[in-house]
Amino acid sequence: MEFNELITARRSIRKYEGGIGHEDLAEILHAAQQAPSWKNQQTSRCYAVETPETLEDLRAKALPSFNQNSSARAALVVTTFVKDTVGFDNDGRPVNEIGNGWGAYDLGLHDAYLVLAAKNLGYDTLIMGIRDAGVLREKLGIPANEEIMSVIAVGKAAESPAPRPRKAMEEVVRFF
Ligand SMILES: Cc1cc2nc3c(=O)[nH]c(=O)nc-3n(C[C@H](O)[C@H](O)[C@H](O)COP(=O)(O)O)c2cc1C
C-alpha cells in the first residue's frame, strides 16, 4: 500500500472475523524490529499468542470485558521492554530525567511499525493499554526486568469504522 494511504487507512478495529497465520504474524513482527531504537539497543519484546486455548485463557483473564469483546477472534501480541537499559549509562545511571520513559518511547516506535506493517499486509489492529500486567506476566512467564506495556490484537477486520477525528494541527504543532 502507498505510505500515505496506509497511515490514513489504519484505525483501531474492535470487531474481528478471524486472526492471522503464523507466517504473516512473523513477517509483521520482523517489520516491527526495523524501528529505530536508542543506541540500537532493541529492548522491545513481543509475546505472540496464537494458539486458541492460550488466546481464550489470556483474553478472559488479562483483559477487561470491553477489550475481550473488541479483540475476540484476533491473535494477541503482548509488548514489553527490558527496563533500566535504554536511557541509562554503563553505570546504570539515567542519562536524563526521562529514565525508563526512553524504553517506553522505543517500544512505542516499535509498536507503530507493527500496526502499520499489519495494515500493509491486509490485517488490522487494536492497541490495548487496559490490561492486567500481573496476569500476563504469570501466564506468559514474562521476566521481572521487563515492563509490560500493551496487548495488541491483530486480525482480519469485521468492521470499517470512520476515521476518528484529530485535533487541528495548530493546536498541537508550533512552527518556529
Ligand atoms: C497506548 C494506547 C492504549 C490504548 N488502549 C486501548 C484500550 O485499552 N482499549 C481500546 O479499545 N482502545 C485502546 N486504544 C486505542 C485508542 O482509543 C485509539 O487509538 C484512538 O481512539 C484513535 O483511534 P484510531 O486508532 O482508530 O485512530 C489505545 C491506544 C493507544 C495508543
Image: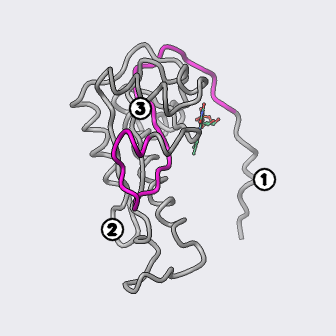
Residue 134 rendering spot, x and y as whole percentages: 49, 45
Q: What amino acid is at disc 2?
A: Asn
Q: Quick check: marks 1 and 3 in contact, CB under 8 Å?
A: no
The residue under label 2 is 40
Q: Are marks 2 and 3 in contact (CB under 8 Å)?
A: no
Which sits earlier in the primary sequence, circle 2 or circle 3? 2
Residue farthest to the bottom?
91
Q: For residue 77, which quarter of the picture?
A: top left
**Residue drawn at x 32%, y 54% as measured from the top left:** 34
Image-based side of 149 in relation to 20, left or right: right
In this picture, residue 111 sits left or right of residue 8: left
Cα distance between the residues tagged 1 and 3: 28 Å
Q: Is residue 81 above or below residue 56?
A: below
At label 1, which amino acid type do we have?
Glu
Report the Cα–Cα distance between label 2 and label 1.
Answer: 33 Å
Q: Earlier in the sequence, mark 1 or mark 3?
A: 3
Vertically, is 54 above or below 78? above
Mark closer to the observer (2, 3)? 2
Closer to us: 61 or 171: 61
Residue bearing mark 3: 119
Magenta region, residue range? 136-164
Q: Residue at x 23, y 29 (%)?
A: 22
Which numbered dot is residue 171? 1
